[in-house]
Amino acid sequence: MFRQAPPRSIFSRSTRLVSLAAGLARHELQGRLERAVTRGEELARRAQQLKVQVEQAKEIVESLGQLKGAAMKAGQLLSMELRDVLPPEVTAVLGQLQSSGPTVDFGEIDSILLQELGAELRGQLEVSPVPLASASIGQVHRATWRPPGGEEKDVVLKVQFRGISDTIDSDLALLERVARVFLSVQLSHFDVTAVFAEMRNVLLRETDYLHEADVLGRYREKAHQVPGLRVPEVHRALCSKRVLCLSWERGLTLDQYLATQPSAEDKNRFTAKVLDLYFREFFDWGLVQTDANFANFLFRPDTDELVLLDFGATREYPPEFREKYRALLLASLRFDRPAALAAAHSLDLIHPDEPPAARAAMHGLLETVLRVFQPAEQPVSFTDPRIVNDSSVALRAYYTSLTCSPPPAQLLFLHRKLGGVYTMGRVLGARLDLRPYVERLSG
């Protein structure tokens, strides 16, 4: 299904976001009035509150899906951050923001290509009008590049929708107000200021495709040294701030790979590749591609290679930060709570003024999440439901115990990647001994 490009003007986008806020407030007011009638019936009250929140979530998904751009991207990230503190019925609706939205008509995409590349370069490209993917910020098309006097190349063009970078500040400012309305009932203490500041930084980088080309080049140099990893080549002649041209890379999507009915050993090996990549990215390189969307990975079982795609969400972590994070993990693995608390304070993971209950909940969360690395748990089955269930319970307990700590914005995207790595292992049905990773941490 094709549709027109998302609205670009600040006025039109603001109108939609303000209408969204008004709609959420309307649902909330209606819910409060209806709950007042059934105040003596606790089950009815809870059911009505849930109904209101689901309607709010539906309105968010519908509005942000039309806007695309920064608003939709921020909505995606916020839905992931809150999945463990909101009712599952609500997060199920918000989860729709993770899916690819309607594609933009090729005429608009072609117009952008002509504007960004010029007539001469555009004339060297034969572009498929059917997109490979359409996301919140841009659209991806396969193409053939025929440079004069050069070799014909199969390439992929990532084309950014018009005006996306111009709407980041206005979209995020308005969506932050929307988020506060949505969170006011269940999470009144949840301060999203730092989260939205981090989103702004990431979105500014994601909308600069020349920056992505530079990061991809540095990432490719590092990955080239690791057997079994493949990263696309950047064709800089066909790149601009809003167009990114990469080599076409063959491979199977996760679903296609599973359809080949790989052996348990093969699935374990690919899961280990993904997990090993995460450790290399963060602890060795300090350069993490933080978007763990399955679409960003391709499998090559014939050559035992993992192909990595889309580096717009790549984030850099300085050595000092990485060492503090390493200290937090090692202390929690040793159940050394004083050392873990000191490391958490240095990372702004928890405010020093939090009460003992919040500190205990933080330790409980860390020790629960890291339990999979304890020797007694090996080998770990990624399909064990306790991993997700226990971690979700611990995270909810942590969030609800906080009185003054904001969400750890600097860890938001890192943990987004780690959660995606685990989810891929679960889908693959992996079973791994994770003790070598603890040895890497300690070494």
Image (cartoon, rainbow, N blue to C red):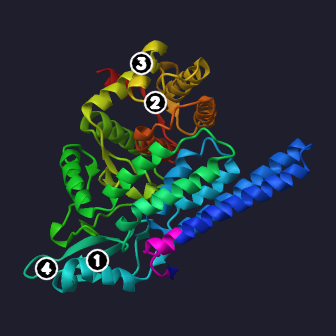
* Picture layout, residue 100 above or below residue 46: below
Task: Give the residues drawn in magenta, as a range.
Answer: 3-14
In this picture, residue 185 sits left or right of residue 410: right
Determine which quarter of the picture holds residue 113.
Answer: bottom left
Q: In what quadrant of the picture does the C terminus appear?
A: top left
Upstream in the sequence, badge 3 or badge 1? Answer: 1
- Residue 342: which disc? 3
Q: What secondary structure is marked by label 4?
A: loop
User: Magenta segment: does it hold 5?
Assistant: yes
Q: What secondary structure is marked by label 2?
A: loop
Nearest to the eye among marks 3 and 4: give it: 3
- Residue to which mark 4 is pinned: 147
- Residue to which mark 1 is pinned: 143
Upstream in the sequence, badge 2 or badge 1? Answer: 1
Instruction: Find out whether the residues at labels 3 and 1 contact each other: C-beta distance under 8 Å.
Output: no
In front: 388, or 40? 40
- Residue 349: which disc? 2
Upstream in the sequence, badge 2 or badge 4? Answer: 4
Q: CA distance from mark 3 to mark 4?
A: 58 Å
In this picture, residue 119 sits left or right of residue 411: left
Upstream in the sequence, badge 3 or badge 2? Answer: 3
User: Magenta segment: does it hold 150?
Assistant: no
Q: CA distance from mark 2 to mark 1?
A: 45 Å
* Mark 2 crowd level (few <14, some 14–19, many ≥20, 10 Å Cα): some
